[in-house]
């Protein structure tokens, strides 16, 4: 297919340089040439802090619902098993 037929179809032709300039700008991966720590800015840190607050609020509400809402024995067993698995995972990761 020639460049004239690609332009007629509505698609833009590929750049002559192989597309290295265009692919670098739209890449989801960080630019490693500028260093590893250069991609983190203050707004991203504040965004992570906001999500942590939301996660804490959801966790507290979940605990209160579990304490107040009567749950079947099987559900309580599953919650306890998941809690033990999570705590062991944290313990093994920390060691």
Image: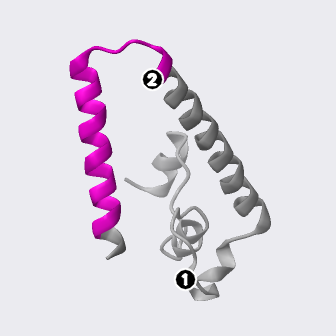
Foreground residue among 77 and 21 = 77
Which of the numbered marks, if any, corresponds to residue 32? Answer: 1
How many numbered callouts? 2
Q: Quadrant of the C terminus?
A: bottom left
Residue 72 included in the magenta stretch of the image: yes
Q: Is residue 74 above or below residue 25?
A: above
Q: Is residue 46 above or below residue 56?
A: below
The residue lying at 50 percent from left, 30 percent from top is 63
Disc 2 element? helix
Q: Earlier in the sequence, mark 2 or mark 1?
A: 1
User: Which residue, given by chain and number where applicable, does mark 2 sit on?
Assistant: 66
Q: Magenta-highlighted stretch: main secondary structure?
A: helix
Disc 1 element? helix
The residue lying at 47 percent from left, 23 percent from top is 67
Q: Specify start and end residues of the magenta stretch as a single range.
A: 67-92
Disc 1 residue crowd, few under 14, some 14–19, many 20+, Cα 10 Å: few
Quadrant of residue 75 within the rendered picture: top left
Foreground residue among 80 and 52 = 80
Which x, y percent locates residue 18? 48, 74
Foreground residue among 77 and 13 = 77
Which x, y percent locates residue 32? 55, 83
């Amino acid at each position: 297919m020639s460049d004239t037929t690609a332009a007629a179809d509505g698609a833009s032709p590929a750049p002559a340089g192989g597309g290295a300039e265009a692919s670098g700008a739209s890449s989801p991966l960080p630019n490693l040439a500028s260093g590893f720590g250069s991609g983190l800015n203050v707004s991203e840190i504040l965004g992570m802090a906001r999500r942590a607050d939301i996660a804490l609020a959801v966790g507290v509400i979940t605990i209160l619902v579990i304490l107040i809402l009567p749950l079947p024995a099987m559900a309580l067993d599953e919650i306890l098993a998941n809690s033990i698995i999570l705590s062991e995972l944290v313990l093994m990761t920390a060691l």
